């Protein structure tokens, strides 16, 4: 006699809903930033380099919670587009420091309002109070579970 699995409603599972929200978030982001041709990860890289000029590629990877090879591909694409440049670190010739180019600064300036619209659209169904609580709980889940990530994030010190 074959046993059947228990019936579970996947809509009641947090992981399923988080995955769906991620899909929705990426879809909204890509719609808002279509004209700029930026992905959420590329935006994160550009914004982080803008916030920390001269950041090395390994630190960038840890900061935006990506593995080194994925980060390398992101940096390659942004460098090919003329938005980033890699410079050899004067302290460690093996390390590459990242800087935004003038084109990268311009792209980021144009992209920020679109990115902000995307964030607003994602949270639009929530009241202001719900948004604050949602973000508080989301940060708690991310921070508390960070060590379980394939590429844990590390804050820049």
Image: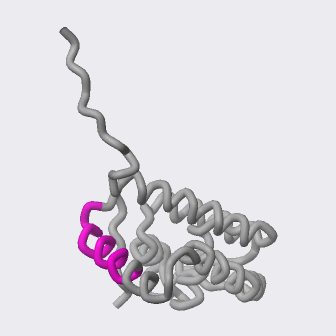
Q: Nearer the viewer, residue 152 or 49?
A: 152
Q: Quadrant of residue 132?
A: bottom left
User: What is the number of callouts on the image?
Assistant: 0
Task: Report the side of 94 relative to 118 (left or right).
Answer: left
* Identity of the residue drawn at 59% across and 68% down: 40
User: Which residue is drawn at the image coordinates 45% and 55% (left, top)?
Assistant: 19
* Residue name at image x 50 percent, y 61 percent: 22
Say above or below: 118 vs 7: below
> Where in the figure is residue 72, as x and y percent of width and height?
54, 63
Asked whether the viewer can see residue 94, the reply is: no
Residue 51 in which image quadrant: bottom right
Residue furthest top in the image: 1
Magenta stretch, main secondary structure class: helix
* 119 over 42 or under it: above or below: below
Q: Quadrant of the C terminus?
A: bottom left
Q: Nearer the viewer, residue 69 or 139?
A: 139
Q: Is 85 left or right of 98, judged from the image as shown?
A: right
Is 138 in the magenta? Answer: yes
Residue found 24% across the figure and 73% down from its top: 144
Classify the position of the N terminus by image quarter. Answer: top left
Tell me residue 117's x, y (percent).
Answer: 67, 80
- The residues colored magenta run 135-148
Q: Nearer the viewer, residue 144 or 154?
A: 144
Q: Residue 62, how many percent across, how many down?
A: 39, 73
Residue 79 position, x and y percent, is: 68, 71
Residue 120 shows in the view: yes
- Is residue 35 magenta-colored? no
């Amino acid at each position: 006699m074959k046993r059947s699995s228990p019936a579970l409603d996947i809509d009641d599972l947090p992981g399923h809903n988080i995955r769906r929200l991620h899909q929705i978030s990426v879809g909204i982001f890509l719609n808002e930033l279509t004209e700029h041709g930026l992905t959420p990860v590329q935006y994160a890289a550009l914004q982080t380099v803008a916030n920390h000029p001269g950041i090395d590629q390994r630190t960038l990877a840890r900061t935006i919670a990506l593995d080194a090879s994925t980060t390398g591909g992101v940096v390659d694409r942004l460098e090919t587009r003329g938005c980033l440049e890699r410079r050899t670190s004067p302290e460690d010739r093996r390390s590459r420091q990242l800087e935004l180019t003038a084109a990268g600064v311009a792209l980021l300036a144009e992209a920020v309002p679109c990115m902000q619209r995307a964030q607003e659209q994602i949270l639009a169904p929530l009241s202001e109070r719900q948004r604050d609580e949602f973000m508080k709980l989301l940060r708690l889940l991310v921070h508390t579970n960070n060590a379980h990530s394939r590429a844990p994030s590390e804050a820049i010190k």
